[in-house]
Image: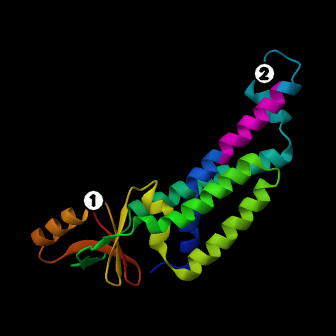
């Protein structure tokens, strides 16, 4: 089982695409503003960094650090120890459950790009979504598993399977492996299945 802290890390890592996009948007907007203010025909990165306001530089550093943290969490999840074996047949594909968080991320990105108060609105959406995510302990709804990691989410009664591949492939694997398939129980009843 994961601690609340690690659940927050998984939720934060789910925003990886948003963090990268925010760094690119900030850099692009700042570069265009710098190019408009620069009287020198030769604009280079060093003079750009000296010109950058401290607030923009701080935002760039924060979003870059969050991007790096997200990659670290992804590496940890990819290299998780599979400490149990399961014999559960997947029934229904419920990958779409992660869509509510994807929608929150899209709204966050749009407010960051098109609003002067984007950072504030984005932080509020991020915190509210994070509180709901951590309290519900529905780790399988994190877009992190679907978008960057490429997993599909299936349910089987009250159990949730996070796995790559189809239901049919899982059923074949279960027939071939009588003892069960290696998995990791992330939360009670939620399993990350080894490829």
- In-image side of 75 versus 36 (left or right): left
Q: Earlier in the sequence, mark 2 or mark 1?
A: 2
Q: Which residue is mark 1?
A: 165
Q: Number of callouts in the render?
A: 2
Residue 15 is left or right of residue 125, and the answer is left
Circle on res. 71 = none
Q: Nearer the viewer, mark 2 or mark 1?
A: 1
Q: Quadrant of residue 50?
A: top right
State the SS at label 1.
loop
Q: Give me the residue at 40% from left, 84% from top.
A: 188
Q: What is the quadrant of the C terminus in the image?
A: bottom left
Give the class, few, some or many, for how many residues have Cα within 10 Å of label 1's Cα (few <14, many ≥20): few
> In the depicted view, which residue is nearer to us: 9 or 161?
161
Q: Nearer the viewer, residue 153 or 47?
A: 153
In the rendered structure, the answer to whether residue 33 lies left or right of residue 11 reads: right
x and y, in percent, of residue 187 in the image: 43, 80
Q: CA distance from mark 2 to mark 1?
A: 49 Å
Rendering coords of residue 68 (x, y %): 58, 52
Assign the N terminus to one quadrant of the image. bottom left
Residue 78 visible in the displayed image: yes
Does residue 78 appear left or right of residue 176 in this picture?
right
Q: Which residues are magenta?
A: 22-35
Residue 180, given in percent of the width and then of the height, sits at 18, 76
Secondary structure at numbered mark 2: loop
Question: Residue beneath label 2, please?
Answer: 43
Q: Residue at x 86, y 42 (%)?
A: 53
Name the residue: 51% across, 63% down.
99
Residue 82 seen in this snapshot: no
Image point (26%, 73%), residue name: 90
Residue 183 covered by magenta stretch: no
- Position of residue 111 relative to residue 189, above or below, is above
């Amino acid at each position: 089982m994961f601690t609340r802290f690690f659940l927050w890390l998984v939720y934060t890592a789910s925003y990886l695409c948003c963090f990268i996009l925010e760094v690119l948007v900030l850099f692009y907007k700042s570069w265009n503003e710098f190019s408009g203010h620069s009287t020198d025909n030769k604009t280079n990165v060093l003079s750009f960094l000296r010109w950058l306001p401290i607030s923009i530089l701080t935002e760039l550093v924060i979003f870059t650090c969050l991007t790096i943290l997200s990659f670290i969490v992804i590496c940890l999840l990819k290299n998780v120890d599979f400490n149990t074996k399961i014999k559960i047949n997947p029934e229904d594909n419920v990958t779409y459950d992660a869509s509510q968080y994807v929608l929150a991320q899209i709204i966050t990105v749009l407010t960051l790009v098109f609003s002067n108060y984007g950072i504030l609105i984005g932080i509020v959406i991020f915190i509210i979504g994070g509180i709901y995510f951590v309290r519900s302990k529905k780790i399988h709804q994190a877009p992190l598993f679907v978008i960057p990691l490429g997993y599909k989410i299936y349910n089987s009664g009250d159990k949730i399977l996070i796995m790559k591949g189809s239901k049919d492939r899982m059923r074949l694997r279960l027939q071939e492996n009588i003892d069960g398939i290696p998995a990791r129980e992330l939360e009670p009843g939620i399993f990350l299945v080894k490829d």
